[in-house]
Amino acid sequence: MRHGRRVRRLAFALLVLLTAAQGVWMAFTAMASVPLSVDEPPLTSRLIERFQPARAALAGLERAGYLDREEGGSPPADHIAFCLARLAVAPTWLIPSADEPVVLTNLPDDAAVDRLVARGEFRLRQRIGAGVAVLERVPP
Amino acid sequence: MIALAALGYLLSAATAALLIAALWPAALSRRDTRALVTCLALAMGPVAGSASDFLRLLLLRPVPAGGWLLDGALLIAAIAAWRYRNRHQREAQLPADGAPLTASLAHRTAWLEYPVMVGLGLALVCVVAALVLRARIQPDGLWDAWAMWNFKARFLYFAEPNWTVIFSAQEAGTHPDYPLLVPMTVARLWRWAGADVAWAPQVVAGGATLLTLLTLTAAVTVLRGLVLGGVAGLTLLGSNYFIKHGMSQYADVPLSLYMLAALAVLAIWHERDRREAGLLVLAGALAGSAAWTKNEGAAFAVWFILALAVVSLGQGPQQAFRAATAAALGVAAVAWMTATVKLGLTQTGTDLFSNLSGEVLWQRATDAERYTRIVRAGRAAWVSLTHPWSILGALALVALGGWRRPAGAWRALAVVGAILALQILTYAAVYLLTSAQLQWHLQTSVERLFAQVWPSIVLLLFLAARPLPAPQA
């Protein structure tokens, strides 16, 4: 009995040490698997730089496989345009889809917001910060 | 900027800490529970902060100092609750119902604590480095982070007077019905920092990942001792995906944190502190926090109360009713925000079950092919995302422990196992009935669902584990 208990204690200690060592190794591989050099800008910048204006963006997104309408489950094209348009990291204005009544801009400055409003498609609902504003689409 | 944001976070964490101390006063007088209470306070801080912000948006938006008023009021209420419990400490000073299962063996396994803790320390350094490096290569997170979670945070921060736009039917693509804990936490950090700094969502994501690891370690330490606590933390790292997904800035890892914490507190109530009803309220509040994080958390909160009631029936119907009521009270204390979003603010329902007639429902429920594909996808995710040794090591530790356990340990195992099983079955049922194309739905979500339950599965494994029996046993 005593011998059996000793063997089980040894097995317990071995298991603890092996499982712990495995965890440390996995943590190390989690760290080591991250690329150290950033070859390309972040996803958002990549998309925005590559796909302007929005109409081109949609076609480009489809070509890049982000919009696989054949699969039937991917987000609709307008949703992507809408996301990009609303994204405050967007460096320039992206035209949202026609059915978006309210949009948030992130333009370089207030003058850019005013220029956009002057085009007549949108009216200013609220100015939030430099280049950041909530606009409403003017009904046709 | 960073100091102000840290101050805002610490203010809400202090509120949470005081409320936890009021619900579980005995925890602060015991050395082995202090680390867990610290983790729980840090995890509940964003919940307290978002409650204050949500109330401010609903009620006090025109009041310029509304944020300060509510933060202060919550803190004062927490201080009052804590002082009230401190005055009635007699029951709190009673010893715990059951000592940890490891107590009789502490002298036999104490030497293992050093290598395990050194290993955990090394692993923590690697995990922090991995999180920082990932934040560097994907500062905006992955798709859903910038298209949905942080997108909503931007509206909460930039367009505050128009914040309800995020619930508009026009925003259907961003799931207006989703709970708001993550976006509100990010927006709160931005508000305190004074700008929409990129590091705020990164801190929320990395913090939740690290806290999950630490909460698991601390909880298993309370229940099974330091050696198995450390090994449990290291077993969590048996899935690299969990760390990788942690920096995606999605809500899955924060959800996994609240699910894990709720189950851990529930297990502690069953095994050690059955006389402390406040623990059940705390566990319920953590389950409610899961419901305030993601829709899957709402299902979790329901299963949490139901399973607790059913397992407690063994102690009599009165005890079952009391336990379920205490847990439901805790759930309601947080999940009222989810209910407000879903029933009062959102103009659209979930898109998962659109156009679901009885005929379609029957067709999908009786389609054997759908069952096969769901099981295959789940199995493939499990095999690809975990390292076999992590699971085998934990299972071998369970087998070595034998089957003798106090009744409380069996009850904890039963209730945690039942809640997890029901949660996984809920995922399967959603896949079975989803209106989306099944293959696409599985491909885009099954790994994230794995991340939601993985920490709780590790907890369950270590609840089953038990060190070797005492020499004279």
Image (cartoon, coloured by chain):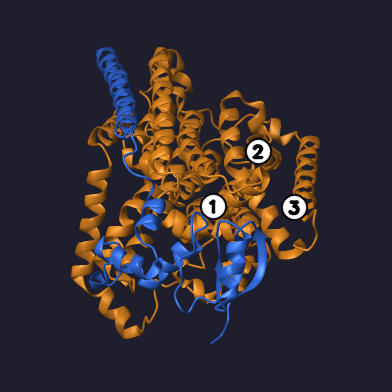
In the rendered image, the vertical position of residue B276 relative to residue B434, given as above or below: above
Q: Nearer the viewer, residue B82 or A51?
A: A51
Q: Nearer the viewer, residue B381 or A95?
A: A95
Q: Which residue is mark 1?
A: B182
Mark 3 element type: helix
Shade of chain B as shown in the rendered figure: orange
Q: Which residue is mark 3?
A: B67
Q: Nearer the viewer, residue B262 or A74?
A: A74
Q: CA distance from mark 2 to mark 1?
A: 20 Å
Query: Could you tell me which chain the residue with mark 3 belongs to?
Result: B
Position of residue A98 measured from the top left corner of the image (x, y, whole percent)? 46, 79
Residue B355: image quadrant is bottom left
Q: How many marks?
A: 3
Q: Quadrant of the C terminus of chain B?
A: top left
Q: Residues within 10 Å of mark 2 (few under 14, many from 20)?
A: few
Going 30% across and 64% down the picture, which residue do you hit?
Answer: A60
Position of residue B80 measured from the top left corner of the image (x, y, whole percent)? 80, 43
Going 22% across and 51% down the picture, which residue do you hit?
Answer: B380
Kind of residue at badge 3: Gly
Q: Which mark is residue B1?
A: 2
Q: Nearer the viewer, mark 3 or mark 2?
A: 2
Going 55% across and 54% down the picture, which residue do you hit?
Answer: B183
Q: Residues within 10 Å of mark 3 (few under 14, many from 20)?
A: some
Query: Could you tell me which chain the residue with mark 1 belongs to?
Result: B
Mark 2 vs 1: CB contact within 8 A:
no
- Of callouts 2 and 1, which one flags the residue occurring earlier in the amino acid sequence? 2
Shade of chain A as shown in the rendered figure: blue
Locate residue B302 relative to residue B281 in the image: left or right. left
